[in-house]
Amino acid sequence: MAVDTGALLTELGVANLLAPLWFFLCWIGYARFADRQRARRNTLAARVHEYRLAWMEQMLARENRIVDIAIVRLLVQNISFFASGAVLIVGGLVAILGAGEKAMQVIRHIPFAEQVAPLVWDLKVLLLVLVFVYAFFKFTWSLRQFNYLAVVLGAAPAPAVPGAGAFAHRAAEVATRAGDHFNRGMRAYYFGLAALGWFVHPYVLILASAWVVLVVYRREFRSHMLGVLGRIGEPVIPAEAVAGVAPQGSRASPFSSSARR
């Protein structure tokens, strides 16, 4: 059945048109900003990559690498939890599409909630479906990459083998790429929570989107954890015997190129 575009725009109104545009601008704009800025600034993602590189260097020195496989297994379990949650959320949202009138009655009891036509309600639900489908794909791709990391660990050579250092960098790069997609999936969860505000009022969606940007920015660029882990280029294992050790030269960052995909 053809949709009357003019009638749809009339039902949406200006606020309901601008709110999702602002939502996607915040989400996509922040993602591009974060991926580019971490190549130039001290960020949590770049610092954790240095810890991953140190992990791989320690892994090469271990004869028994059960500990490393256990770490990968723990990471996979955590990601599987969020991937399963995304599937359940999508299933629940699809069910809401079939019971929109009952769901709309619940929203009507919320103070200041905007009353909208059923077609506009369905668009709001579809926005959430889109967000969590995206999260599911990011989590599952991260899972596959951590599986590849397990294979890479199984192929790790002894530290005395020529090229072992380059192998450690490659393994750390695989782990970082997997972590990148996990971070993008988590970011989708955050913005999915912001999208819930649209069910109350478009202005709530606008405010919630901006709030999520501030939260994720602080966690990635200004968090206390970043201060605990240290600045980029500092030794992961501090030289305790020397007071005030000067930071080592910065290692080549994998984020110096264009944003990862």
Image (spheres, grey):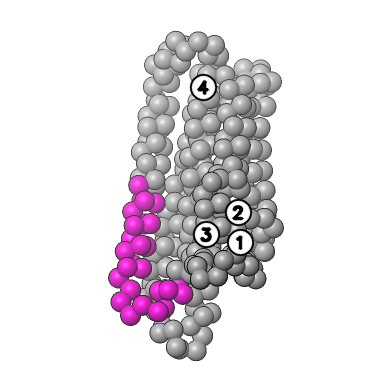
| Badge nearest the viewer, 4 or 3 | 3
N-terminal of the two: label 2 or label 4? 2
Closer to the camera: disc 1 or disc 4? 1
Amino acid at pointer 2: Thr
* Mark 2 and mark 4: Cα distance apart in space: 34 Å
* Residue identifier under label 1: 232
Q: What range of the chain is rendered magenta? A: 56-81
Residue at image location 31% in from the left, 64% down from the top = 70
Residue 162 coordinates in the image, percent (x, y): 50, 89
The mark nearer the N terminus, 4 or 3, is: 3
Q: Residue at x 62, y 70 (%)?
A: 248
Against 222, residue 89 (above or below) is above
Going by the numbered disc 4, the residue's amino acid type is Phe
Marks 1/2: CA–CA distance: 8 Å
Which numbered mark, 1 or 3, is in the foreground of this view?
Answer: 1
Label 3: few (<14), some or many (≥20) within 10 Å? Answer: some
Marks 1 & 2, CB-CB < 8 Å contact: yes
Q: Is residue 8 visible?
A: no
Q: Is residue 158 visible?
A: yes
- The alpha-carbon separation of the residues under discs 1 and 4 comes to 42 Å
